[in-house]
Image: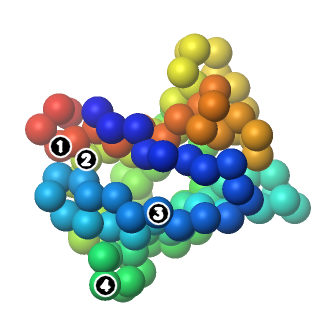
Amino acid sequence: MYTIAFLDLPSFSIDVTLETTPYHFTFHWNSRGAFWVMNIDSFDLVRLVSGVQLVPNFSLLDKYPGRGLPPGLFIAADKRGNRFDITRDNMGVEVVLLYVPSDEL
């Protein structure tokens, strides 16, 4: 299981290698709706999925099969098990974005 780094910025991008494949992630805080969204691109910046809302304790990419996405499981999890709502300030602190590789499922 891996924790995807989350920066204390309202919008940022990071490159992450998952299961030997590099990906480009972009995260944006939607201040009007008060939620985070995630985009995932291939390493050569081909958009694989966009606008995925980060919700707690839910498999985030199940409804996007066959797009070249990482084969494991993404979940935004409350580190203390309290079922927090995800806010601008607690993402990356009390709530973390986890990736579970396919061989651990």
Q: Mark number for residue 102?
A: 1
Relative horizontal placement of residue 1, taking residue 29 as reference (left or right) = left
SS state under label 3: strand
Q: Residue at x 14, y 58 (%)?
A: 20
Q: Earlier in the sequence, mark 4 or mark 1?
A: 4
- From the viewer's perspective, is residue 89 above or below residue 65? above
Residue on which the image places disc 2:
72
**Badge nearest the viewer, 1 or 3:** 3
Q: Residue at x 61, y 64 (%)?
A: 12
Q: Residue at x 56, y 15 (%)?
A: 81
Classify 10 Å Cα crowding around label 1: few (below 14), some (14-19), many (20 and above). Answer: few
Relative horizontal placement of residue 46, taking residue 57 as reference (left or right) = left
In contact (CB < 8 Å): disc 2 and disc 1: yes
Residue on which the image places disc 4:
44
Q: Earlier in the sequence, mark 2 or mark 4?
A: 4
**Badge nearest the viewer, 2 or 3:** 3
Q: Earlier in the sequence, mark 1 or mark 3?
A: 3
Kindly identify the amino acid type of the residue bearing the numbered disc 1: Ser
Kindly identify the amino acid type of the residue bearing the numbered disc 3: Ile
Q: CA distance from mark 4 to mark 3?
A: 13 Å
In contact (CB < 8 Å): disc 1 and disc 3: no
In contact (CB < 8 Å): disc 4 and disc 1: no
Kindly identify the amino acid type of the residue bearing the numbered disc 4: Asp
Q: CA distance from mark 1 to mark 3?
A: 21 Å
SS state under label 1: helix
Q: Earlier in the sequence, mark 2 or mark 3?
A: 3
Q: Nearer the viewer, residue 92 or 66?
A: 92
